[in-house]
């Protein structure tokens, strides 16, 4: 390799790095959700600093569905994403397709629900919860990663195949 050239990270290693992001981000989401669930159930004032009004958001009628804190539902969603992310790292390529699609679907649902809750914060409650924003950003990043798990990665390995359908596949190989 000549001086000044950047070494290409092998395709499989890139896919594992991208795939590892899902369980790592899910742990962050579980931490945020666990904290907000605890605060909600114990009727505590969330630590929010000067950045917003988390108490208004976390004690509003929109913070629970049939008595179940929305944050607890978020925790379960992140926990499922964590498990799916770990399975995606360990399974054969043919299984990854289904698992990656499940991650995509679950994270899309999370993004859409977070968008709804953000609308409620901004236009109904007129209050922002930085913890909720952190969770919305986390699920949005997971969604972005899930898309990248399904899109083609360029292959510069010299084996003749120019692309492979991401981590997700074993079925489709383009030339």
Image: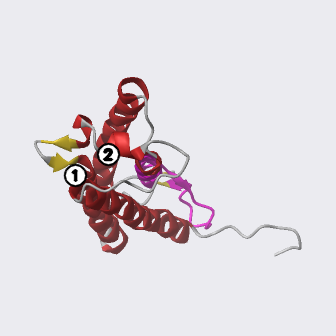
Q: Quadrant of the N terminus?
A: bottom right
**Residue at 27%, 57% in the rendered image:** 37
Image x and y of residue 127, in percent:
43, 34
Q: Residues within 10 Å of mark 2 (few under 14, many from 20)?
A: many
Closer-to-camera residue (155/106): 106
Image x and y of residue 137, in percent:
47, 47
How many angstroms separate mark 2 from mark 1 (CA)? 14 Å
What label does residue 58 carry, if any?
2
Name the front one of labels 2 and 1: 2
Image x and y of residue 165, in percent:
44, 53
**Residue at 30%, 71% in the rendered image:** 91
Q: Is residue 87 above or below residue 130?
A: below
Quarter holding residue 167: bottom left
Closer-to-camera residue (112/62): 62
Q: Residue furthest right?
A: 3
Q: Is residue 28 above or below residue 55?
A: below
Q: Residues within 10 Å of mark 1 (few under 14, many from 20)?
A: some
Q: Secondary structure at mark 1?
A: helix
Could one spot residue 156 in this view of the protein? Answer: yes
What label does residue 62 carry, if any?
none
**Residue at 12%, 46% in the rendered image:** 67
Q: Residue furthest left?
A: 66
Q: Are marks 2 and 1 in contact (CB under 8 Å)?
A: no
Image x and y of residue 124, in percent:
35, 25
Please say whether residue 153 is one of the residues in the magenta stretch.
Answer: yes
Quarter holding residue 20: bottom left
Quarter holding residue 92: bottom left
Question: Where are the magenta residues, as a range?
Answer: 135-163
Question: What residue is disc 1 on?
Answer: 73
Q: Is residue 44 above or below residue 104?
A: below
């Amino acid at each position: 390799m000549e001086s000044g050239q950047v070494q290409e990270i092998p395709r499989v290693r890139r896919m594992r790095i991208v795939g590892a992001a899902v369980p790592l981000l899910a742990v962050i989401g579980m931490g945020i959700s666990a904290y907000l669930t605890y605060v909600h159930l114990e009727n505590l004032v969330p630590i929010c600093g000067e950045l917003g009004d988390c108490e208004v958001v976390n004690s509003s009628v929109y913070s629970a569905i049939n008595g179940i804190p929305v944050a607890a539902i978020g925790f379960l969603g992140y926990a499922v994403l964590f498990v799916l992310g770990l399975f995606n790292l360990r399974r054969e390529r043919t299984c990854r397709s289904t698992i990656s699609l499940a991650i995509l679907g679950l994270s899309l649902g999370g993004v859409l629900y977070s968008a709804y809750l953000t609308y409620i914060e901004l236009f109904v409650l007129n209050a922002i919860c930085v913890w909720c924003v952190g969770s919305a950003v986390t699920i949005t990043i997971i969604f972005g990663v899930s898309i990248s798990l399904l899109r083609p990665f360029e292959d510069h390995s010299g084996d003749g195949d120019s692309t492979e359908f991401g981590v997700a596949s074993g079925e489709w190989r383009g030339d």
